[in-house]
């Protein structure tokens, strides 16, 4: 379910069937790694729903959203042409996040959500398209 890139610390032992269990918070603290967790996609839209955890440099100018968009690079469909001003601020007990909404048809809602965490300069980016409303589409980023 998780895909990683970068270098991981070698101090973690393999478990059964050569699987390794590393909490995402420890992985992000100890390594320059990008971790992607897949989410189900029950829509007909192309692309994968996912939550990606990565490091965001504390250097740079602009808002955290602008820096995050620069770090992400190519944005997933249907958000290829989104800009910083398309994001709405929101917050929960995990802190502040920003999200943009696209509704490709009457039943489908897609969100691109960005949460910058103050601890370890972590960045969570989620693309989630669901058959439902914005609240349902935002659920995975609210859980993390």
Image (cartoon, rainbow, N blue to C red):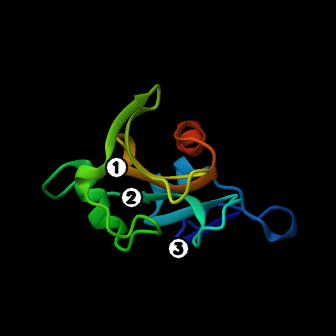
For the residues labelled 2 and 1, say whether their Cβ atoms are less than 8 Å apart: yes
Mark 3 closeness class: few <14, some 14–19, many ≥20 residues within 10 Å: few
Q: What's the CA distance linking mark 3 and mark 2?
A: 12 Å
SS label for mark 3: strand
Q: Earlier in the sequence, mark 3 or mark 1?
A: 3
Where residue 105 sits, quadrant-wise, is: bottom right
User: What residue sits 71% from the left and 59% below the top?
Assistant: 42
Tell me: residue 119, above or below residue 29. Answer: above
Where residue 19 sits, quadrant-wise, is: bottom right
Numbered label attached to residue 72:
none
SS label for mark 2: strand
Judged from this view, the residue extending furthest toward the right is 16
Q: Earlier in the sequence, mark 2 or mark 1?
A: 2
Closer to the camera in the image, 139 or 115: 139
Mark 1 closeness class: few <14, some 14–19, many ≥20 residues within 10 Å: some
> Is residue 27 in view?
yes
Numbered label attached to residue 55:
2
Q: Earlier in the sequence, mark 3 or mark 2?
A: 3
Numbered label attached to residue 121:
1
* Residue 52: percent from left, percent from top: 51, 59
* Residue 87: percent from left, percent from top: 31, 47
Mark 2 closeness class: few <14, some 14–19, many ≥20 residues within 10 Å: many
Numbered label attached to residue 5:
3
Q: Is residue 2 left or right of residue 126?
A: right
Q: Is residue 100 left or right of residue 129?
A: left
Q: On the rendered image, what quadrant is the C terminus found in?
A: top right
Closer to the camera in the image, 76 or 18: 76
């Amino acid at each position: 379910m998780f895909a990683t890139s970068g270098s991981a610390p070698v101090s973690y032992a393999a478990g059964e069937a050569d699987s390794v269990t590393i909490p995402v918070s420890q992985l992000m603290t100890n390594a320059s790694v990008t971790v992607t967790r897949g989410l189900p996609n029950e829509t007909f839209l192309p692309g994968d729903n996912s939550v990606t955890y990565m490091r965001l440099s504390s250097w740079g100018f602009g808002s955290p959203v602008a820096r995050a968009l620069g770090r992400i690079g190519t944005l997933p469909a249907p958000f290829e042409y989104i800009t910083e001003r398309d994001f709405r601020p929101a917050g929960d007990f995990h802190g502040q996040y920003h999200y943009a909404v696209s509704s490709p048809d009457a039943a489908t809602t897609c969100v691109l959500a960005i949460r910058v965490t103050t601890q370890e300069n972590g960045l969570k980016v989620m693309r989630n398209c669901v058959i439902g409303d914005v609240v349902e589409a935002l659920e995975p980023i609210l859980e993390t």
